[in-house]
Amino acid sequence: MKNNLISTLSFYLAFFVVVLVFSLSYFICDISLLSSVISMGISFLFTFFFSFYLLSSKIEKNIIEKVSAVYNNLFPTTISSRSTDNFDLLTSNLKKITNEKNTEIELLKQQENYRKEFIGNISHELKTPLFTIQGYVLTLLEGGVVDEKTRAKYLKQAAKGVDRLMYVIKDLDLITKIESGIETLDRTAFDIRETLNNIFELLEIEGVRNNITLRMDKKYEDPIFVFADEERIQQVLTNLIINSVKYGIERGVTEISCERMNETKLLVRVNDNGDGIDEEHLPRLFERFYRVDKTRNRIQGGSGLGLAIVKHIIEAHNERVFVESRIGVGSEFSFSLPLANKKELKKER
């Protein structure tokens, strides 16, 4: 567009000069027609190219100065003085900045949607137990219940609502502390086999109640020492196994395996043969209060923060958590842990 404008201006200027030269040479100076035409041609070409060069350099310089001034004010650290001397480089920089700003806007929109959804979810999670407590307490205060057994039943139900409310608040508090760095990790070298045995003993009744078999993929004869916060890793494994048991199928299996990735890393897997999770839900599974099947999950209980806690604890160890799932086949949650080295083992002993 800039070149078209300059070409048009140069053409009109050259045409004006040609008319002027022809008038001077033919009518005033009485030069022959052929000489006048040659003079016109030379004048036209010289004037056109000279004016095109002059105008293009002047206009380009003017545009660069104006645009550079604006963008140097808006983005003082983004565009260097060298980059503003070249029109093409400046254009490239401006396009890059525009793309970056568009990306930022999209990210802000996504964060805003996440914030709205999060507020809606947390209000629902807190509102449900509060309404339960309110209903039973108001009934008792109004004196409508005379029977002692019924009163005791209502008080127990209200207490369950309080417990659920405290459970949600406690989990939220833990995530906030981990994110802010207030909750520090107490890293020690420990045998993860013993941790798994303790969890199996604690969750054995839960497995029997849901008709789910808990087992290791094989018998591990040698110790597997990792260097991490044992209490937090136990919480990670407990959350993953409880999820697997709660949402598993009748007579299902939850299997845990430990695999050395290399000399310094261990991969812990929690597999099940449950219903599986649709692929569209996988990227958001570790978000706070995100539920795949909202109705079923609320019936099963829980704060909706179990997987979010798993993610935050593992990331606090500078490790990663993974998930794979197929509908009708099952799910696999896995995470990496650092293996304890000789120095860390010697320190513990």
Image (cartoon, rainbow, N blue to C red):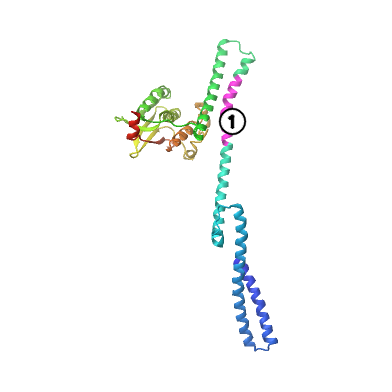
Relative image position of residue 97 (x, y in whole percent) = 56, 53
Q: Quadrant of the C terminus?
A: top left
Secondary element type, mark 1: helix
Left or right placement of residue 234 versus residue 136 in this view: left
Q: Report if residue 61 lies within the magenta region.
A: no
> In which image quadrant can residue 53 be found?
bottom right
**In the depicted structure, whether residue 198 falls above or below residue 327:** above
**In the depicted structure, whether residue 294 falls above or below residue 82:** above
> In which image quadrant can residue 123 be found?
top right
Relative image position of residue 39 (x, y in whole percent) = 62, 83
Magenta-drawn stretch, dominant element (helix, strand or loop) = helix
Q: Could you tell me which residue is drawn at 57 percent across and 50 percent down? A: 101
Residue extending farthest right: 28
Question: Is residue 323 something one can see in this rendering?
Answer: no
Q: Could you tell me which residue is drawn at 60 percent across and 18 percent down? A: 137
Kindly identify which residue carries mark 1: 123
Question: Is residue 299 something one can see in this rendering?
Answer: yes
> In which image quadrant can residue 187 be found?
top left
Q: Could you tell me which residue is drawn at 52 percent across and 29 percent down? A: 173
Given residues 16 and 93, the one toward you in this image is 93
Amino acid at the residue labelled 1: Ser
Specify the segment rendered in magenta.
117-135
Relative image position of residue 177 (x, y in whole percent) = 51, 32
